Image (cartoon, helix red, strand yellow):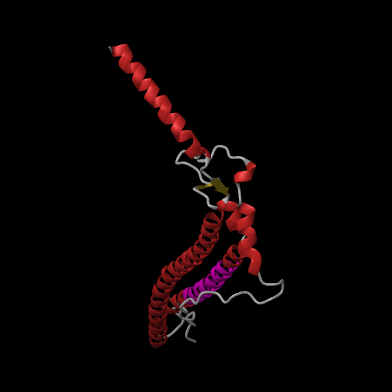
Amino acid sequence: MMKRTLAVASALAAFAFAAATPAQAQMKVGVVDMNKVFSDYYKTKDAETRINEARAAAKKEMDDRMEARQKLLDEINNLNKEVENKALSASARDEKGKQRDEKINETRNLEREITEFKNTRERQLQEQAVRMRNGIVEEIMKIVNDKVKADGYDLVFDKSGSSLNGVPILLYSKDGMEFTNDVVTALNRNKPAAGSAPAAAAATPAAKPAATPKK
């Protein structure tokens, strides 16, 4: 009885596999190298250029503030020497002491401004980069989805994706399954001619100008 039951089960399994094979054979699978799509899309390069320019401008502003801070520290050191100079009268030394205290307060205010500027600008640059990347992802996915619908794909894999262990998720695919170049071509169809002005960068709130030491 047991042998007969196993035989029936095996037959049913074989029939189910045979019935599923034609449906599986009709499934259309596509492959896209998303890393290549990102790197070859002209807007990705433009976004990287704008972010790098924004970072360079932020560094210049920070350097200006740090230079102003160093000048204040030098002035404080010089005033300290004058306060300790016994050749000066007591009133002159008191006056130098007041000037030194004013410079110390000015330095503390500038240091607070530097900290605020650094934190604010880093957050702004990060938000700007995320906005740009999200916009690029949206444009890429629209082209991919249009291709999927037009050509009737059932599944599409990203061949550049990796597992948590760093192993490629897609181990093998036939060359005919990949349509990466089609996506890149569609994305770059409206690429501006060389020498034309790039799109305006996303607006970033202006930071306070660097403090100038009082004379």
Report the front residue among 5 and 213. 5
Which residue is drawn at the image coordinates 41% and 68% (left, top)?
A: 119
Q: Residue 66: say if magenta.
A: yes
Does the image show residue 181? yes
Which residue is drawn at the image coordinates 39% and 26% (left, top)?
A: 13
The quarter of the rendered structure image containing the N terminus is top left
Q: Residue 100: say if magenta.
A: no
Vertical placement of 66 versus 180: above or below? below
Report the front residue among 120 and 209. 120
Quarter-of-image position of residue 199? bottom right
Q: Position of residue 22 (x, y in %)?
A: 50, 36
Which residue is drawn at the image coordinates 35% and 20% (left, top)?
A: 8
What are the residue bounds of the magenta stretch?
A: 49-73
Q: Position of residue 62 (x, y in %)?
A: 51, 71
Vertical placement of 46 versus 165: above or below? below
Does the image show residue 40? no
Residue located farthest toward the right when viewing the structure as drawn: 194
Q: Position of residue 120 (x, y in %)?
A: 42, 71
Q: In the image, is 134 to the left or to the right of 40?
A: left
Report the front residue among 53 and 72. 53
Dominant secondary-structure state across the stretch colored magenta: helix
Q: Position of residue 100 (x, y in %)?
A: 41, 80
